[in-house]
Image: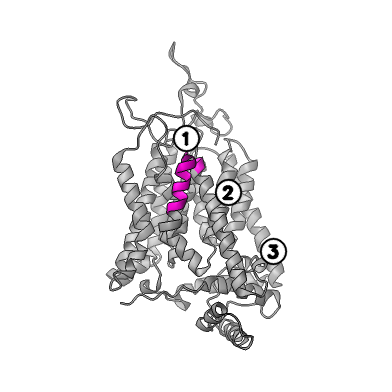
Amino acid sequence: MAVTIRRAAAVDFYHFWLMGAVVRAGEAQNVYTPAARIEIGERAYQRAVRSGAGPALRRAATKFRRLETTATPFLYATFFPFVTGHYERDRTVFNALGLLVFVLALAAVAWRLGYGTTGTLVLVGLVLLVFEPLRSDVRVGNVNRLQFGALVLYAWLLWTTTAGDRVRPALAGGWLGIAALWKPNLVFVIGTVSFVWWVRGERARPWSHLAGVAAGALAAAAYAIAFFGTARVWLWWLQAAARLTHDFPVPVGEGNFAPTRVLEQGFGVRLGVAWPIALVALLGLALRRTASSRRGSAPVDGEILVLVGIGCAVSLLAAPLAWLHYYLLGVFLVAWVLRPAPRGGAVPWPYRVAGVGAVVALSMGPLLQLFVPSAPYRWAAFGNGGLLVLLLLGLYDLGRLEFGPPIRDASVCPSTNRSSLPTKPGSSSPSATARSTPWPRSPKGRGSTWPRSAPPSRV
C-alpha cells in the first residue's frame, strides 16, 4: 500500500484562513454542509487562479476544491487576525508564532520539572529536531502548538493552588473551557483533573473548576455566535461532527493513526464505540485506584502536568481520527518520563529504558512508514504503542508519588484529616515528615537507587 502525504502544503492552515475570511466577509454562514464545502472551495479556487495568487495558495486551493470544514465555529471565529489577504505571509507569521509559543511553553514545563538550564535546552532541541508530530504540525499548519501552549498556561494556573482554593481552579477551568471549544479533544483533560480531585476527597476545587469550564465554554460559544451571526452554527457543527468518519473515511495510509483504524485496517478487528468506552472506563478505574490511596494529601509538585498528559494521551488513543500532528500533545508525558532525578538520587533503569523507548517510538515511529510503505499500519501501531507506554508510566507515577503534608482543612476532607492524630513520644508529626518529590522513595528508605525526597511544595 502506497503512503500518500495527504495533509501537506499547510492545508489545515488554508482551511482556517479561508473560513475566517469567508465568514467575516459575510459570504457564508453554514460552512459545514457538503454543498457549501464544494461551493466555497470552488469559488476560492477560481479566485486564486484569476488573481494570480502565489504558488502555495494555488496549490492548496487546487487540492481542496472540496473543503474539509470540521473545526469548531470558535476556532474559525478566532482565526481572523491571521487573515490579511496575503496567504504566504499569513502562513509564515502563523507558523512562527506557533513555534515560539510551543518552545516557550515546553521550556516552562522543563524548568518546572527540574531540568535546569542545560537540560531544558537539550529537551527543547531534541523535540525540535526529531519529534515528528511537531514537524507535521508545522507542515500542515495546524494549531496543536498553540493548544499545547494553552494547556501549559492552564497547568501554570494550578501549580500554586492549594486544597480548598476556589479562585485558581475556577480561573484555570474558565481558560480550559475556552480552549475546549477551540478543539474539543480537551474534554478528557477536564474529566481527568476533576475526577482525581474528587476521588481524593476534595469538593471545593472540582466544583469551582467545572463551574469555570462551563463559564469559559459559554463565553467562547457566545463569541462564535456573534461572529457567525446565528446560534444555529453550533448545531450545524455538531451535525457535521457526527458525520465526520462517514464524510471523511481516512485510511492509515493517508495519515489516520487512530488505534481503532489501525486495528480495523491492519488486523480486521472492528471495535467501534466499544474501544473509547472501554478505554475511559479503564482510565477511571486506574485513576480511582491511584488517587484514592492519597486521600487527604496535598498534591506533589508537577502532578498537574502528568494529569494533563494523561488526559491528552487518552483523547488520542480514543479518537476515531488521529492525524500525526495530533500526537504533539504527547510532549507532556515525554517531558514527564524523561525528567531528571533530584540531587542525590537516581532513576530506576527499567523505568528509564521503558520511557526512552516509548519516546523514541512516539517520536520516530510514524516517520518510519516512509521507509516501509508496504505496511504503514504497523508503524502507526508502533507510535501508538509508545504513547500507551507513556500513559502507563504516568499512571504508575500517579500512584507511587510521595505527596505532601495532609490537608488540614477538615471541611475539604474530614474523613482523612490526619494532622491532629497523636504521635509517639519523640516522633515528629506527619506534616513535618511528609515530603514531595516526582520520584517515589524506597520503602526501606536506605540503600536504594530511588532519589531522596524534596521539601514539600504548595501546588
Counting residues from the start of the chain, the first of labels 2 and 1 encountered is 2
Residue occupying the far top of the picture: 425
Rendered location of residue 300, percent (x, y): 48, 36
- Side (left or right) of 74 relative to 112: right
The numbered dot on residue 295 is 1
| Residue numbers of the magenta segment | 111-126
State the CA–CA distance, disc 1 to disc 3.
Answer: 40 Å
What residue did someone put label 3 on? 223
Which quadrant of the figure contains the N terminus? Answer: bottom left
Residue 303 in view = no
Q: Seen in the image, is 91 located left or right of residue 295?
A: right
For residue 296, side relative to residue 132 (left or right)? right
| Above or below 407: residue 99 | below
Residue at point 57% right, 29% down?
410
Q: Nearer the viewer, mark 2 or mark 3?
A: 2
Residue under circle 2?
154
Give the image location of residue 106, x and y in percent: 51, 50
Q: Are marks 2 and 3 in contact (CB under 8 Å)?
A: no
Q: Amino acid at mark 3?
A: Tyr
